[in-house]
Amino acid sequence: MIAIVEYGVGNLASLAGSLESLGLGCEVTRDPARLAAASQIILPGVGAFGDAMQKLWETGLVPVLKAEAGRKPLLGICLGMQLLFEKSYEFGEHEGLGLLPGSVCPLGPDLAACGRPELKVPHMGWNRLDVLREDPILANTRPGEYFYYVHSFYAKQCEAVTLAASPYGLPVPGVVGRGRVYGTQFHPEKSGDAGLRLLAAFARL
């Protein structure tokens, strides 16, 4: 059973529907006992980093997620991926879960700094994913496939854990991972067949 973390942030119905379409059992929960019993955990998320971390603390899930991340595969999606990092500079400075090295920073200033200020923020829509390192979570991903993004902040200083990236004036980390901890900046549940195949690969970890 795959546990989807429910903490008041994220489109849980769409994600659950995608997993169910693959024949994968899933449960939306914030119960530590159910998270401990799960074979894998998915941490979704939309919205602001600071608010999401506050909700994780209020629900008592921060120590639970840190403990379970060492025991079973954990996948953060979109904001959920960003929460895996050490800190974020979204509307101030906020501490993350610290499961992966790196920081979450605004995309706009870096696009301007690299000479691409015309690119819109948020980075929204379909973009090509280039695989940088082979990993089981990418076993079903074909070269140059497209995935669906919606984000204004992105992960930096995380080259050591970046498995795949998408070009948007600069390389945007699209898939990150170390040990049993993974994240996707894009939404696999909104990425058609390519996204479903990635979720299926995660379910086999």
Image (cartoon, grey):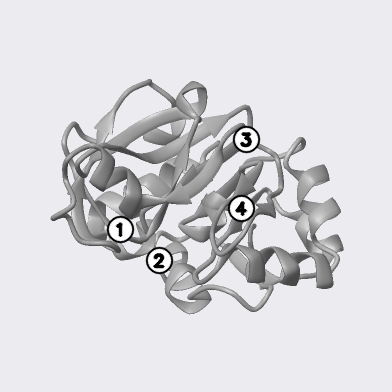
Which residue is found at the position 40% from the left and 59% from the top? 22
Residue type, numbered disc 1: Tyr
Which residue is found at the position 69% from the left and 73% from the top? 7
- Looking at the image, residue 82 sits to the left or right of residue 72; the answer is left
- Looking at the image, which is closer to me, 128 or 54? 54
The residue indicated by pointer 1 is 149
Q: Are marks 2 and 3 in contact (CB under 8 Å)?
A: no
Disc 4 residue crowd, few under 14, some 14–19, many 20+, Cα 10 Å: many
The residue indicated by pointer 3 is 100
- Looking at the image, which is closer to me, 130 or 14? 130
Position in image of residue 15 (x %, y %): 46, 68
The image's mark for residue 83 is 4
Picture quadrant where residue 114 is located: top left
Disc 2 residue crowd, few under 14, some 14–19, many 20+, Cα 10 Å: many
The image's mark for residue 18 is 2
Residue type, numbered disc 4: Leu
